[in-house]
Amino acid sequence: MPDLLLELFCEEIPARMQRKAAEDLKALVTNALVERGCVYEGAKAFATPRRLALHVAGLPAKQPDLREEKKGPRVGSPEGAVQGFLKSAGLSDISQATIQSDPKKGEFYVAVVEKPGRPVPEVLAEIVPEIVRNFPWPKSMRWGAASAKPGSLRWVRPLQSILCTFGPETETPDVVRFDVDGIVASDVTRGHRFMAPDLILVRRFDDYVTALERAKVVLDADRRKDMILADAKTLAFARGLELVEDEGLLEEVAGLVEWPVVLTGSFDESFLEIPAEVVRATIRANQKCFVLRDPATGKLSNRFILVANIEASDGGAQIVAGNERVVRARLSDARHFWELDRKPLPGFEHVPGTLLDQRLAKLRKLDIVFHEKLGTQGARIDRITALAKELAPLVGADPAKAARAAELAKADLVTEMVGEFPEVQGLMGRRYAEQQGEDASVAAAIEDHYKPQGPSDRVPTDPVSVAVALADKLDTLVGFWAIDEKPTGSKDPFALRRAALGVVRLVLENGLRLPLKPSFAAANPADVGADLLAFFHDRLKVYLRDQGARHDLIDAVLASGGTQDDLLMIVRRVEALGRFLDAEDGKNLLAGAKRAANILAIEEKKDGAGAFDGAPEASAFVEAEEKALAAALVSARGDADAAVAREDFEAAMGALAKLRPVVDAFFDKVTVNADDKTLRANRLRLLSSLREATRAVADFSKIQG
Amino acid sequence: MSDALAPQRSFQGLILTLHRFWAEQGCVMLQPYDMEVGAGTFHPATTLRSLGPKPWKAAYVQPSRRPKDGRYGENPNRLQHYYQYQVILKPSPPDLQELYLKSLRAIGIDQALHDVRFVEDDWESPTLGAWGLGWECWCDGMEVSQFTYFQQVAGIECSPVAGELTYGLERLAMYVQGVENVYDLNFNGLEGAEKVTYGDVFLQAEQEYSRHNFEHANVQTLFDHFKDAEAECRSLLQKGDAGEKHLMVLPAYDQCIKASHMFNLLDARGVISVTERQSYILRVRELAKACGEAWLRTEAGGA
């Protein structure tokens, strides 16, 4: 079976786009092949800074023949209709069509169109240029003389050559003949930009990978990552140090080199007086280097790992020296900022309070707009401060400390350090606050109020941090809801889903009782309660589903009559319901309750919704089983309601579980749809009461199985 | 070339080497534009010449002023006045990357020894209404140049696309001379009493202009100059409008450059709030766009 090898060779592709581009290339080519009847055995795509490559194995040499039946008009249709049919089917005379008959439609013409399959290279020559022209790069560009004309080829950076071969393993594959805007497909590529720039003749995937390897190109990004990680760990170990692993950086660095060469550099130890996070951020963001730490103390070392793209003739000495120069300059800047931020702020020396208060005064004075409809950062700080103070008692925090932390939470945004390294916001505020003698909880809250930033981020537990973190997120959510800037589809520019998930995690993981609607109202007078609450329920579902909870149980609890405003109670109920349904009594009661609900649903269709609401008449009962059920319902309902009222959901379920034998007996013995109309209505009312009783904990009809 | 003019020995030697290299590629060697600009891109030889169908190859040094970057001569890496080496090639030649690498070799950056990398960096100038895709070029982890394929300038699609190279001359010189402080750069390549450093030439200027930019520039005068330049630009564009053709784009564009510099000075004085900032940028962009559109109606613009 023949294989396809395709390589699109271009100027340096941004690292962050490479992996997705390789996957897109694979999907686009293989889908287009399959659409044309060419199934394949396997496909794999690769990316380096300068190339996307695709290997598709086990393709047919030729497309399968296609036989298509085209239905035409009825026999005896007007001439126009017949002519139109002949034209669309590609026939010259109606005698070439066959006649079929159908009991409904009568006799009609059918044209059988046979399409012989084309050789796959021909098919490829048709699909590849289209794919290249319409490739889904996040950003693409035009270049060169061709860009003088409209509609010229776009690519992520100038596309330089295309390699495309097709053929079986046993023979020399052929070049697939096509061109894209003058770039003619061939069987040549190039190796490493500096170490092996000459042309390489390629036949198929196997010799392609080997030839590239010889030409100092590692095609597979994951292999480059493995090589970097292994070498970095070895180099660290050799110096008695440990690599601070960083998957995001590793992925990026692997996209910046075709031939990774891992080296170590160092900087003056005196720079270690700068907060470690800043050192790391500097070295990571500007230099794309890894930092190392002492495995015994966990402290940052003054060595770093850099990844070069060449095997330098001096063993990398100059490369290391160059990188060290830049790191030194950057760290000098960072130290300068660190010192500046701990001095009085020119123009604000007379602001009462600490140095951070001076920064806060500057932030207010700058009138930095948070959002045009939501006012300035200053106004936002005031709102968050007020809200944090109000929420503090609910989360067990000292209101004064919560207010102080909220007030200072954004002050570091105008420090020199955060201006230069935005990723250390919060953290720097904490460091400066600690140095200026703020309360430890206040300082911690300045850093932690941004948390959690996502499903895996740490959730703060100190009550002051929790109060400010909640206030920050609720202010954002309610504010954007009030101006109708809600997330839609994949668009969530203000990260409101993340903010709501943050609130969910803060509440649940700290076991907090936070009534949501009153909290919304405290954050903003606009009436956004119901809609925002529904949004929270959605986020809660996503969160619980990720935790492995059954989504139908969540729906069942949310649809029940209980409070929807208290996330913790919703979760407790879901948990209790899950345990209840795992037990035998629960399963059987569920079956009975569902059976009751189904019968009711059918009968309500006939008699109208609500036809069987209200309590059944005790005097109308005939059978012992229905009397027993009615009596059991009254006591179970009372017990369940009482248990729910004291938030003991286990007990509420337990009370309901007691219904199981009487429900089973009822369905065994009693005919609900009795001929006697009064009897039937009364029995249906009894079932309706059963449904009501179970709704005290959950809407059983939403539960699957 | 004498030793003193080797690119590793002197700042001027570096410039001369680049001049020779790009002259050999057929560029016209221009002199700096005689106005205060924030970057080499503002020179009409780039902004305006990158518009329209006519081929164009030019190279020049452009003194660039970024009032906010002044550090009173105290920071070894930051200057409010520095030099950019600017190359503009329209249409972008197919071997532009290779040409760039050759130019680095010409100034002594041996690519068997140094790690040169093209790292994604999409360029945008909101004031010029311009953007392009390209890279920052790294040498051993240091950004030494900016490499851009212009896609749009003055809000107008570039057709054909021009390639722009911008070398940060001081940084590059520091690297090839092995110097840690910009003021220690050897300017003329001589030693002993004859040696002139970058500090000898520019340190006093950095100190004086930092005082001016941050403390003493008259804010009201700057606001007035901005308004005047804006009005003059519009007026010249109107007066030069001769129906199909335009007869006065370059003088109008000078006023656009001036307005941009006034804005930069006001920004350094800290008197422009965040919200106002955006509107000032927009006002300059509107001027740049109007100039760009008028340019297409001139001889050099391809009309």
Image (cartoon, rainbow, N blue to C red):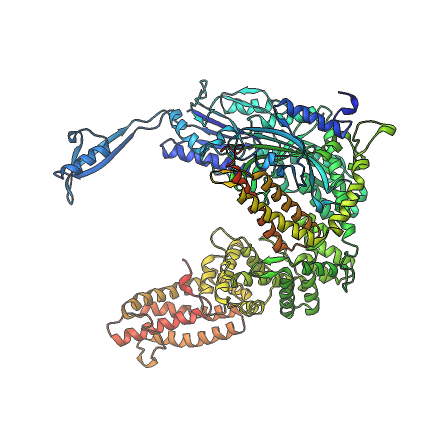
Q: State which quadrant residue A678 falls in.
A: bottom left
Relative to B66, is B201 on the left or the right?
A: right
For the question of whether residue A696 can be seen, the reply is: yes
In the displayed structure, does residue A348 sit left or right of residue A196? right
Residue B41, horizontal then vertical, whole percent: 62, 37
Give left or right: position of A20 versus A306: left
Q: Residue at x 62, y 67 (%)?
A: A387
How many numbered discs, if any? 0
- Please state which of residues A459 and B271 is positioned toward the viewer in this rendering: B271
* Furthest residue toward left: A76
Q: Taking the image as drawn, is residue A508 in sight?
A: no
Give residue A528's position: percent from left, percent from top: 50, 66
Quadrant into which the N terminus of chain B falls = top right
| In-front residue for pair A538/A158 | A158
Closer to the camera, A147 or A163? A147
Residue A371: give x, y in percent of width and height.
58, 58
- Residue shown at the point (54%, 43%) measured from the top left: B239
Placement of A464 over or under A279, stated as above or below = below
Q: Does residue B166 lie above or below A518 as drawn?
A: above
Please state the horizontal and vertical placement of residue B98, each as a whole percent of the image: 61, 25
